[in-house]
Every structure is written in C-alpha cells, then in structure tokens.
Amino acid sequence: MFLIGANLSAGNIIYPDYWSEIRINETIPRTYLEVIRETNHYGRDTSTHHNSYEENSSSHIYWDRATGFITETMLETIFTEKTRNYTTYYSSSLQIIATNLWSSIPSSPVEATQELIETIETWNLPKGTGNSLTAKLKVAIHMLDLGKEDGAIRKLTALITRVEVLREKTLANEQADELVLEAQRIIALING
C-alpha cells in the first residue's frame, strides 16, 4: 500500500481489483517537508473481543493526492490476554523525510502565497470564509509585486488573526493550524 493512483478523492476505491473495497475516507491538507499537501487518508479502527483476549487496532495511512505516494502511516495494536492478565502494546509510524516529487521550499513568497490560495480553494469552505482568507492573500501578493514587503507581512499577520477567530467555527483545527504554519513560513521567506 505504498503507492496508490494519483488524484483520487474521498470515497474512491484504493485498489479496485483487491478482494475487498478499501476506500479513501477523506482528502485533507497535511504538511510534509514544510509544504501543505492535499493527502488522501484511509483510517480503520477494529476491535475483537473473545472470552480469553481482547484486541484493539488502529490504522491510518496517508498518501499524497497528486502523486499517490505514501507520506505517513500510524499503526497501533493493544492486545490484552485476560486469562494470564497481561497487555501487549504495539505501535509503528512512518513519515516521509525527503522527496524529489515536490519542492520543499517554494522559490518565492509569491509562489508560496499562491499555493496557499490554491489549498484554501480546495477545502470547500463557506463562501464568506474562503473569500475573506484568499482576499488577504491576494492583497499580500499584490503588495509583494509592488515591492512593499512590510505591507505583505501585515496582510499575512491579519490572516493569522482571522484564522484564529474562525478556528473551530468555520475552520477545523487542522485547517487553522495549516494556515497559521504556512503564513508564518511565508513571512519567514519574505524576511529572508
């Protein structure tokens, strides 16, 4: 399961010819190598209860949506033997640490800001929320084009403030975290 089809979305079958239909649960933004990437997530929790033992497992796998390559896995199993009274805990995780499939640092603050606009547009946010965020980013790009870096930084700071207001209202915590992290990274790019 290290590679799946590129450009799949939530609800798509991961391996159509596989013996069971494993489907993508959701497509969400996640940060890998300092870049927000749209990722496909498959997660499954299972429990087995028997007279002599109990087993609980959790599996979460993430693939880069654009390429289909795996970016992260988290597997956890807790096995409890009831008759001998012991518990075994197993956990493993993997995360991508390098790739040549995408650039880890955009070449310019304008490029990074444009990528952030594109990410927001894929989130299907309420229209007012999406517009208020992308408008600030478009003004930041305009300011950068005019050479007014301080103005761009003020707009990015205003974006961070707006995100905190919208957190848990019209923005999920994970989306808010991604936006704040990326806006801070763009500010750092501007400051050089």
Image (tube, rainbow, N blue to C red):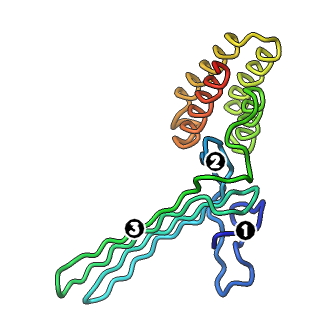
Label 3 crowd bin: few (<14), some (14–19), many (20+), radius 10 Å: few
**Residue 158 image label:** none
Secondary structure of residue under mark 2: strand
Which residue matches tag 1? 12
Q: Which residue in the rendered view is the most extreme toward the left?
A: 84
Q: Position of residue 22 (x, y in %)?
A: 64, 75
User: How far is the residue under mark 1 from the one under mark 3?
Assistant: 27 Å
Label 1 crowd bin: few (<14), some (14–19), many (20+), radius 10 Å: some
| Residue at 78% across, 60% down | 7
The answer to whether 86 appears left or right of 156 in the picture is left
Number of residue marks: 3
Secondary structure of residue under mark 3: strand
Give, as a three-letter code, the residue at label 1: Asn
User: How far is the residue under mark 3 from the one under mark 2?
Assistant: 24 Å
Give, as a three-letter code, the residue at label 3: Ser
Q: Quadrant of residue 80?
A: bottom left
Which residue matches tag 2? 29
Where 73 sits versus 14, above or below?
Answer: above
Mark 1 vs mark 3, foreground winner is: 3
Q: Position of residue 56 (x, y in %)?
A: 37, 74
Which residue matches tag 3? 91
The residue closer to the viewer here, 173 or 38, is: 38
- Counting residues from the start of the chain, the first of labels 1 and 3 encountered is 1
Which image quadrant: the C terminus?
A: top right
| Residue at 77% across, 63% down | 6
- Counting residues from the start of the chain, the first of labels 3 and 2 encountered is 2
Give, as a three-letter code, the residue at label 2: Pro
